[in-house]
Image (spheres, rainbow, N blue to C red):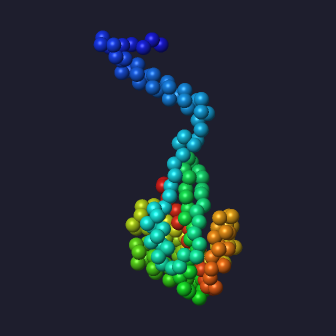
Amino acid sequence: MTASYEPDGRRNRATAVIGWTAALTAMLLISGCDPALFQRESRVDSIAVSDVSSIGKVLARTTTEDYGDGLTTINEVLVLDVGSSNAAEALDAASVSLRKLGWRVAIPRPPESVYLESSRWKGVRLFLYGLDFYESWAEPGPQEEKAISEARALTKSPAPLVVEMYKDES
């Protein structure tokens, strides 16, 4: 294809667009359409994490990552002590505190878990779990196991909670 030029020596706009399109297509083909070129990341706002952390004593904190459809979701995992004597009381106390901070209970399942959605941060959601239930049901990975071990070493509390926070981009 021969490039066409305007009378003043500039390339014709259509020729320039075709040239850029061809160059972009060639780059994608050469790179093998590497999905990393299109990878997005979703992360909970640090202020939201601080807000949730304020409902109790943070015993441990870590992050995990989920991957899918070109999106990396960074999950915040906290182990909290809210000063309760059992998991059901801890879930209730945490839910009450979070509702005061603008969270809405979407799915209550005491004494195992509670699912909440934020009214202040778009798409931010969290699960509250009693620690024993979390360990038996959620199949914690290495990061969570380490956080749980650290938390157990720091407290004699009978009812720590695990909080999993994430931002839903859908």
Relative to the observer, which residue lies in front, 97 or 51?
51
Q: In this view, does 41 lie above or below 125?
A: above
Q: Can residue 138 be seen in this view?
A: no
Q: Is residue 32 above or below residue 107?
A: above
Residue at horizontal 42%, vertical 14%? Answer: 3
Residue at horizontal 58%, vertical 63%? Answer: 63
Residue at horizontal 41%, vertical 24%? Answer: 17
Left or right of 138 on screen, residue 166: left
Left or right of 136 on screen, residue 28: left
> At which x and y percent is residue 145?
68, 69
**Number of numbered labels in the structure image:** 0
For this orientation, the residue located farthest to the bottom is: 85
> At which x and y percent is residue 170?
48, 54
Residue at horizontal 47%, vertical 13%? Answer: 1
Q: Can residue 58 be seen in this view?
A: yes
> At which x and y percent is residue 67?
60, 52
> At which x and y percent is residue 161?
58, 77
